Amino acid sequence: MCHGGGGSAKTAATSTRLSDKADAMGFLAVYPQAVPLHPGQPVTFLRNPTFWNVGAGFGHAERIGIDDVAYVGAVLDDLSRRFPIDPSRIYVAGFSNGAAMAMRAAIDLSGRFAAVAAIAGHLWRKTPPPAHPLPLLYMIGEDDPVVPRAGGVVHSPWGDSHTLPPVSDTVDCWVRWLGLPATPEISEPAAGVYISHY
């Protein structure tokens, strides 16, 4: 479970409560930690934020060339040595910048994951496609100010601005990669909640 930009492994664990579910259901939950702007100093959301290198064209992790995909691969190798993990049942998920990291890891390490879940993040690198097709669960909020559904100029909490694509770009790309029909089946299981199933 990859934390969002400015977050930490600890905040991912506490905000998702995934460890509680893991304990109840008998699986392993893992929270990798991105490199902060000032390594060696405590992570803080505004003054020493963390970011994953997701191929977005901005952020300190990309600027200094941190290989977060190799890091995720090394975490998987380490876990496989320490625990009796079923290699066909490893999943990657993330929130915001962590969602972008989860998708990038799923693409570059597609043979190592069974599926990916991305919450409020973008797929930045659209080539090459994953070598092995992967199911994607993608969630977005209609009123998200940082990852607006329609895209546009976004002012981040760190004082910079970026022009983001519409979130449909991420979904459409994944749909093409899987060779699925472009038109989804749409349902509304609860008021204001829409599911597009491809």
Image (cartoon, rainbow, N blue to C red):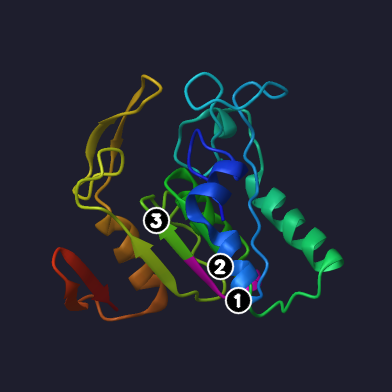
SS at mark 2 in the image: helix
- Foreground: disc 3 or disc 1: 1
> Looking at the image, is 107 positioned above or below residue 159?
below
Residue 85 appears in the rendering: yes
Residue 119 badge: 3
Which residue in the structure is indicated by mark 1? 25
Q: How crowded is mark 2: few (under 14 residues within 10 Å), some or many (20 or more)?
A: few
In this rendering, would 131 be left or right of 158? right
Circle 1: residue type = Met
Which residue in the structure is indicated by mark 2? 21
Q: Distance between the residues labelled 3 and 1?
A: 22 Å
Q: Do the residues labelled 3 and 1 touch (CB within 8 Å)?
A: no
Q: Give the range drawn in magenta.
A: 111-116
Q: Earlier in the sequence, mark 2 or mark 3?
A: 2
Is residue 24 on the magenta stretch? no
Circle 2: residue type = Lys
